[in-house]
Amino acid sequence: MASAPHVVIIGGGSTGAGIARDLSMRGLDVTLLEQGNLTHGTTGRMHGLLHSGGRYAVSDQKSAAECIEENRVLRRIASHCVEMTGGLFVKRPEDSEEYFEEKLRGCEACGIPAEVVSGSEARAMEPHLAEDIDKAISVPDGAVDPFRLVVANAASASEHGARIETHSTVTDLLVDGDEVVGVEVDHASGAGRHVHGVEGGTEEIRADYVVNATGAWAGRIGEMAGVDVEVRPSKGVMTIMNTRQVDTVINRCRPKGDADIVVPHETTAILGTTDEEVEDPEDYPEEEWEVDLVIDTLSELVPMLADARTIRSFWGVRPLYEPPDVGSTDPTDITRDYFLLDHEERDDLRGMTSIVGGKFTTYRMMGEEISDHVCDQFGVDADCRTAEVPLPGSEDFSVLRDYMDEFGLRSPVGRRSVERLGSRADEVLKTTDPNPVVCTCEGVTRAEVQDAIEGSGSNLNAVRIRTRASMGNCQGGFCCHRLASELHGEYDEATTRAAWNELLEERWKGQRHALWGEQLSQAMLNYALHATTQNRDHDPAERDGPPVDFGAFDDGATPTDDPPTRDAVADGGRDGD
Amino acid sequence: MSDTHSPNDFDPAEPNTSEEYDPVDVAADSADADLRPGADSCYKCSTCDTTCPVAEVDDDFPGPKFQGPEQWRLKRREDEQTIDDSVMSCSNCMRCDGACPSGVPLSEMHNTARGEYVDEQMSKTSVEYWRNRILANYRTSAWLASKVPRLASFAMNFGPARWAMEKTLGVTSERDFPEFATETFREWWERRGAAAESRRRAREARSRLDEPVDGDKKVAYFHGCYSNYNTPEVGKAMVRVYEHFGYEVVVPEQRCSGTPMFANGMVDDARRHAEVNVSSMADLVDRGYDAIASCTSCSMALRQEYPELFDIEGIDDVAARTFESVEYLRIHEDLRGELAAADIEGDLAEEFAYHAPCHARNQGLERQAVELFGELDEVTVTDVGDSCSGISGTYGWKAEKYDTSMEIGDEMFDHMEATEGETGMTECPTCAMQMEHGTGYEIRHPLELLEAALVA
């Protein structure tokens, strides 16, 4: 073959980005297509657990062994995305002793370092654990930032020549006879970075091979070529606490069940989850009982959760898959393993493979397997290097620095910034320009925001997932407009306004599920501030009816000697009079 | 060594008046309280920042919202090196506590963060550390000085010595050190007959007041260091005024309240002193005594900071039964009636420029002097406004903080100058230093005026 084969990967989640990195590092020509931002689907809607494998040590030992292997790999190649918090499987008095023993033996069988700690030892590690817990098993669970990890994979793929397209929806597969030869894509804006208001368009992309890595959406892509991919989407809720009540991953040590995990994630703690099969991965009810259930149940492990502040809840859809002959009725029985469906073998359709099921923690391993498979198709003999080469940002770096001297940043802000940026910290933060903190809750500075804008265009949600800006306790109440201002210069007013609106809407979406107590007060304050200073309650420029009489606003002293008219109204008036 | 006797055999009639030098314990424990959940109450409204006197004049100071809820939320439990050094520019006025509409434990967050910063990030061999430690342990210096008060008063204000102190330690030479009393309050108290004499006088007063002579009016006086070593007239006024109303006073063993130590992040020093104070006060409170402080920062420490920062047996009871000296009398006695019938003559028949200390504000006491002395015809008490005096204990004594301190105090100085007369009034000894330093006024404590009106 004269030139490298061109592979189109559909799906910009962890799997797709992992495959894109792997194949591009092996020298293939890669295009990655994602309908939203990177991590738009399930990857951006998980609790950020880096599995030790402990959770599967009884029910699914193959997955458990894969988890501990990949856990070690990610600590090495993605150190700036991973926080090794450690994890505990906590047994309450009413939980089964037999299961506890099984868990321990399972961990040993799968090579997961596990150690039994007494109730008081566990409480010494995590003082907010319930006083009456019996004991716990300590395992090397960790926390991982899925956004950062996927962005780093995409950046690495890009460095190796891959084309990354976000906001680009695959509308059809191009099939020639019995072979998939490309895709038809609808770009929301022009190709490349996503910029609001830029005219989109349709593009046909020819490909030597197509990989369907769309997770819960895999069935839809399959349909376009007339093949069945029986993904069984299952929803689960995750509730985000304002602060970290625990600094270790806390699992309930009992057989499968709802609401059994707390993951410390960055400044927050994420509670999860539920498991309910849904029809449509994009349209399913987000129900209040689910949030109540996770808070109530997890309060049995960490009592202070009952009264702690919740900042938002979100739902994710697991892309579960099982071979059609298994026939599980309960989604919790469906395996967490992944499956590579070669449509040539399976459906006599050449040129495409789907990858379904699996877990975030093993995304790289899945990527390796499917990359091997793709390479086999073309007789490419190249070794996988993704387990050895660190991701951009995770090259040798230290988080302990003199933040004030080096970057002019306050200690906690500098620390958080360097943690997020990893080895890119110098490149991004060393600036001679003023570098104010834009998001004070998460400690995100202008330099980091500008770096994200450079990488992702005018899309402020893409900036958000890269930086964590607007993801703290005020949920963007005090920084969304500042983030929008950062677009100024490069982008015009209409683009900025569209990006700003989209960010506010996204921030509101999750907060709707946390409107009681402190977060309700926060939302009311945000509303009042946005209404009074940004016309967010009712923008007079955008309503129907007669045009606004801007002359009725107080525009300062007039050059005439006439006394001011009494009917000037400061708010523009309902009817502009 | 009288320090070693246990609370059980402590006799309030035999207070410990002997002193000994505190050996300095360099191997301090780390502050380990996790205050991240305190950030749950913050809505980021910034009201605290708008009331912070330091943030108002120092653009480099990020303010209480950053120091408190933001820093704690961003912090990791076992992180090293994450407390920003700007926490040392917080003066611990605690105004943010009162400003917060939502109950964020701001000063507790600041005190704990500062303690952690000093423990883990500040070099124990630095001049700043030792300067702060010496300033925070004022009681130790004052105790030494009280042995040779005249020499100490001279030496501490001897020009070349002060120049050297500024150059080597960073203690500003702009300020005059307070004079040391030739007889400490405790020496006077002992000489006068201590608790037995107080009991005799209280009984006398009760019979004059037609109250049961065996009545149960008894208080334990927390005089603090300044009334003991520098202004014993305040302590004497307290004793005489309380006896006038029929209270028996005891003066238990006590150390520094800890206020200057909290402000300098010397939490372990503060804990050692608090243990002595709580142990002697708890014993008395248990026997029906109320704890009375004449310094509003001392009463603040016992009431709020102790229970927030320490876990010492009896601490909550002591906190609940601690009062400021004038506040307590306003609660239990008809002070207004007495003052309405009283006359005052001599150098206290004056217009006073009254400044309410920030720590008095936090206890809801900022109006008491103004309201109370309105009843006295010969006296006018003019409130000089709600600004901070700027000295904040040891803060204004640091050479690098001196200008900030004076800039904060500017508004108060202006308002003081606008009053008739040249006398000021406040409950706080260091506010008094700043008032005097900025205006040259003589500064009195409300107890002194009460004494002049009711006892003299």
Image (spheres, coloured by chain):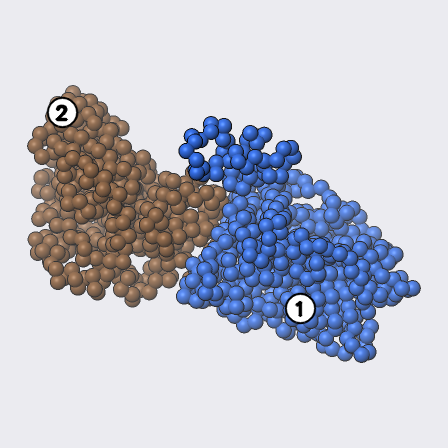
Q: Is A493 left or right of A200, judged from the image as shown?
A: left
Q: Residue furthest top?
A: B210
Residue shown at the point (51%, 52%) measured from the top left: A439
Residue A387 percent across, percent down from the top left: 66, 71
Check disc 1 and report the residue beneath it: A158
Residue B29 percent across, percent down from the top left: 36, 58
Q: Amino acid at mark 1?
A: Ser
Residue shown at the point (62%, 58%) measured from the top left: A457
Q: Secondary structure at mark 1?
A: helix
Q: Residue furthest right?
A: A177
Q: Is B18 left or right of B383, judged from the image as shown?
A: left
Which label sits on residue B98?
none
Q: Chain of mark 2?
A: B
Q: Residues within 10 Å of mark 2 (few under 14, many from 20)?
A: some
Check disc 2 and report the residue beneath it: B342
Q: Chain of mark 1?
A: A
Residue shown at the point (51%, 41%) measured from the top left: A533
Q: Amino acid at mark 2?
A: Ala
Q: Residues within 10 Å of mark 1 (few under 14, many from 20)?
A: some
**Does the image show residue A97?**
no
Q: Residues at badges 2 and 1 in contact (C-beta under 8 Å)? A: no
- From the image, state the color of chain A: blue
- From the image, state the color of chain B: brown
Q: Is A470 left or right of A2, judged from the image as shown?
A: left
